Image (cartoon, rainbow, N blue to C red):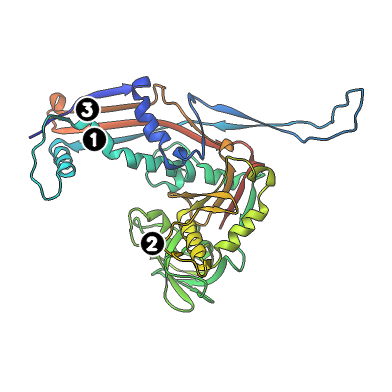
């Protein structure tokens, strides 16, 4: 049988660089190169933005300046320090390790010494990576894992609020419906549901009334701005089944209050080709030809695009079984797994920044077995991280949302 040990570790600086890189830099979008990483961001870091026009002039023996003024502005990376802390009972931790290690249907002993401090770190690593991914893009307000007090607006809310960004809305006939009622059970009434299907994701804005989402307890949050998976009930009604932010917890949506009006926006199989065609036509040619330019889309839009490709593939064998290529007219489509619904972002990775401080003293990891000190049969883990996100040129970003 294995001998379980627990090594008290307290790492900082270089000793922690590997773990910090795993938590901060192995977030999904960072591994795919969608963000430019800047290390050693210990305090506010200034990113200088310099832009100017180019004027082609007549030849001249005398130098004539083109007489334009270079626009110089600044963006900032303001790092935020936050922590993950967890205490577990020693025997429960050992039992958990055994349950994961036993092969199904076999009773096997284990040789050697098992260090449960490493196991405890690894079991939370993926969840920390997902939490950081959501934090980078959605900000603290839409990341339920983030309970720290410091502001962390996230890239999408910052881009949405920024002047100069090319912004497009979904409030058009092909991508929106007017709701005349939202009941306390989450049933939405519209004129026609023929363009909707079970599993579609809708975003609700312009709410008139007192509708609140109580999925995570009363008094709940405003339905305004929330997105939901739906089930079509009739020719004029559909039900809000699950909040899009609860896709991992799978909690059913619950509500209180009602509304007498709202705007329902969506991207689904019925309109995804039209939406992508419109987006493509509005992209800046100078940006979209760059090798690091991507269109970033949420998972449900990627599904709609794959389904639309299969539907259009007439007389093609395996149209509904083959993997679909995720690009549109040569532009890569990046599927964002932990993202904002009904949103498309066009951006170069060299224009989106993630600041970290892997070697700084503010980044640390410690695991401690408390019994030798307090006689409590528990182990504790603390991981402290430091990060910041921002963009550089607002006028080089394309942003579509509800």
Q: Secondary structure at mark 3?
A: strand
Numbered mark located on residue 99 in the image: none
Disc 2 and disc 1 in contact, CB within 8 angstroms: no
Picture residue at 67% right of the left edge, 53% below the top: 282
Location of residue 310 in the rendering, given as x and y in whole percent from the top left corner: 49, 65
Location of residue 185 in the rendering, given as x and y in whole percent from the top left corner: 38, 70
Q: Secondary structure at mark 1?
A: helix
In-image side of 376 versus 356 (left or right): left
Numbered mark located on residue 368 in the image: 3
Count residues near mark 2 (Cα–Cα under 10 Å), then give few for <14, some for 14-19, many for 20+: many
Location of residue 226 in the rendering, given as x and y in whole percent from the top left corner: 47, 58
Identify residue for label 2.
242
Disc 3 and disc 2 in contact, CB within 8 angstroms: no
Q: Where 111 falls versus 260 (above or below)? A: above
First in residue order: circle 2 vs circle 1: 1
Q: Nearer the viewer, mark 3 or mark 1?
A: 1
């Amino acid at each position: 049988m294995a001998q379980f040990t627990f090594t008290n570790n307290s790492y900082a600086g270089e000793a922690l660089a590997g773990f910090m890189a795993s938590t901060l830099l192995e977030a999904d979008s960072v591994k795919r190169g969608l963000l430019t990483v800047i290390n050693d961001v210990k305090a506010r870091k200034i990113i200088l933005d310099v832009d100017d026009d180019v004027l082609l002039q007549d030849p001249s023996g005398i130098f004539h300046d083109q007489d334009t003024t270079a626009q110089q502005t600044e963006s900032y990376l303001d790092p935020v320090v936050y922590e993950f802390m967890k205490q577990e009972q020693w025997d429960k931790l050992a039992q958990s390790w055994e349950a994961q290690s036993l092969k199904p249907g076999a009773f096997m002993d284990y040789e050697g010494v098992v260090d449960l401090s490493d196991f405890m770190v690894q079991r939370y690593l993926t969840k920390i990576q997902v939490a950081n991914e959501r934090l980078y893009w959605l900000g603290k307000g839409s990341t339920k894992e983030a309970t720290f007090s410091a502001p962390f607006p996230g890239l999408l809310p910052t881009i949405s609020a920024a002047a100069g960004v090319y912004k497009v809305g979904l409030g058009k006939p092909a991508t929106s419906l007017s709701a005349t009622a939202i009941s306390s059970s989450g049933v939405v009434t519209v004129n026609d549901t023929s363009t909707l299907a079970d599993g579609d994701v809708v975003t609700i804005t312009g709410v008139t009334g007192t509708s609140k989402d109580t999925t995570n307890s009363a008094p709940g949050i405003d339905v305004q701005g929330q997105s939901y998976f739906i089930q079509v009930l009739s020719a004029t009604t559909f039900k809000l089944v699950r909040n899009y932010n609860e896709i991992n917890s799978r909690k059913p949506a619950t509500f209180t209050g009602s509304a007498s009006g709202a705007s329902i926006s969506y991207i689904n199989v019925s309109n995804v080709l039209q939406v992508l065609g419109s987006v493509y036509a509005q992209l800046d040619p100078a940006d979209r030809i760059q090798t690091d330019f991507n269109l970033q889309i949420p998972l449900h839009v990627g599904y709609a695009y794959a389904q639309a490709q299969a539907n259009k593939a007439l007389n093609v064998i395996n149209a509904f079984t083959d993997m679909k290529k995720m690009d549109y007219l040569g532009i890569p489509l990046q599927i964002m797994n932990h993202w904002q619904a009904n949103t498309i972002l066009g951006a170069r990775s060299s224009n989106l920044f993630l600041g970290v401080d892997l070697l700084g003293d503010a980044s640390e990891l410690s695991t401690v077995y408390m019994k030798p000190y307090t006689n409590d049969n528990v182990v504790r883990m603390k991981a402290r991280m430091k990060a910041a996100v921002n963009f550089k040129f607002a006028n080089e970003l394309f942003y579509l949302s509800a």
